[in-house]
Amino acid sequence: MNRMYPLELTPRLVEAIWGGEALVSRYGKSGDPSAKLGESWECWTENPIAAGAAAGKRLGEVMRVMGPALIGLTPLEDKQTFPVLTKIIDAHLSLSVQVHPTDAYARAHEGQPNGKTECWVILEAASGAELIFGFAKKTDAAEYRRRVADGSLGDILRRVPAKKGDVFHIPAGTLHSIGAGIVLFETQQSSDLTYRIFDWNRVGADGKARELQIDKAADVLDFRESDRAAVQPLTYRLFGAERSLLVADTRFGVEEITLTARSRYLIESVATLFMAEGQEIEMRAGDENLTLRPWQTYLLPAGFDRAELWSRESGAKLLVVTPPGADERARRRLELAGIDPARIASFLAQFADR
């Protein structure tokens, strides 16, 4: 690539036995609306670039060619893989009860550079929708194994109501499941390591029960009674936009911006992902002009130091995702906006490893 420009990513659609039609009918994805589509992988190392000089090339290829001009100065364990993976998930039916390993366990036992911490932004939730989010009481590996064997594990799962706009941070080791009737935006470490514990007695397309990873799950589960709740976002104003910090983990950051006028966005020398929520948003970055289509993901390389954003509709919203180091970048933005240090510390404490 001789010229740097915003990259539109072509998503990967994934069928799942629990999926539905929302990704095609309401989120503009190209696919068969009669298929059970569960996931749209929005930003992934293998996603093709949709247009421009890099059209058809995979994000990973472009990343290797551009190097720091794309990813920035973010330190990476794996320089061949984009450090975050984002998805839109349509849980028409409940997902399996599962857990993801920590970075240390993934390196020691899976030969992979990292495990998976993730977060969810709820886009839609049916009346009464809920998540499974940790254990309802303190337990241990022995009780866990006994309850898996006798079918009573559900008695100690913690169920949490979910509604549109809720944000949940799910550290590696947290038992969890997305309940039926939920569509959400997920940001996670770039890993697909999942240990399935219980799958509601379903069978796959081959007519067989899907494989469970009960022993590996026992190695990584956090058996403490869970008190985690929805994240308390921190809202502030900066550069002409209302901004709401949703997640600021060491591994990734997620922010929602509400445009009330033409707004500046400082890129902070890292690759930055943008997704407009429902309305078109105009972007100018350097000499490049781009229309962000609803629910489509765009990556602005780190070589851009700022962007301007505006919309014909007041109140247009977009989700912004940034790679590792998001906690310290968020701290600097909040300080620049004049937020009290105690409020900053309280917000960031929600994502500290316990």
Image (cartoon, helix red, strand yellow):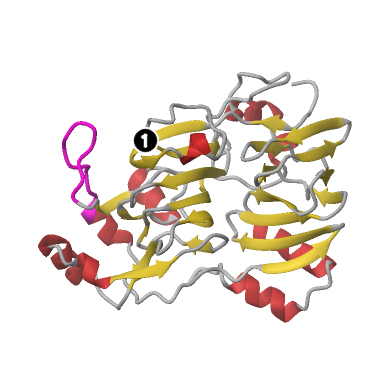
Residue 298 in view: yes
Residue 335: percent from left, percent from top? 80, 69
Instruction: State whether residue 62 is above or below residue 122.
Output: above
- Give, as a single range, the part of the protein colored magenta: 201-214
Task: Say left or right for 134 vs 323.
Answer: left
Q: Say which quarter of the image contains residue 86.
A: top right
Residue type, numbered disc 1: Lys
Q: Say which quarter of the image contains residue 238.
A: bottom right
Farthest left residue in view: 150
Task: Say left or right for 212 vs 100.
Answer: left
Residue 281: percent from left, percent from top? 76, 41
Q: Is residue 302 magenta?
A: no
Residue 291: percent from left, percent from top? 76, 34
Q: Name the residue located 70 percent from the left edge and 31 percent from the top edge.
A: 7
Task: Pick whichever, 203 or 134, lies toward us.
Answer: 203
Task: Say left or right for 306 vs 156.
Answer: right
Q: Name the residue located 72 percent from the left edge and 68 percent from the top edge.
A: 235
Q: Name the residue located 77 percent from the left edge and 46 percent from the top edge.
A: 269
Residue at image mark 1:
36
Q: Is residue 206 magenta?
A: yes
Residue 325 in view: no
Instruction: State whether residue 347 is above or below residue 107.
Output: below
Which secondary structure type mostly characterizes the magenta part of the structure? Answer: loop
> Callout 1: helix, strand or loop?
loop
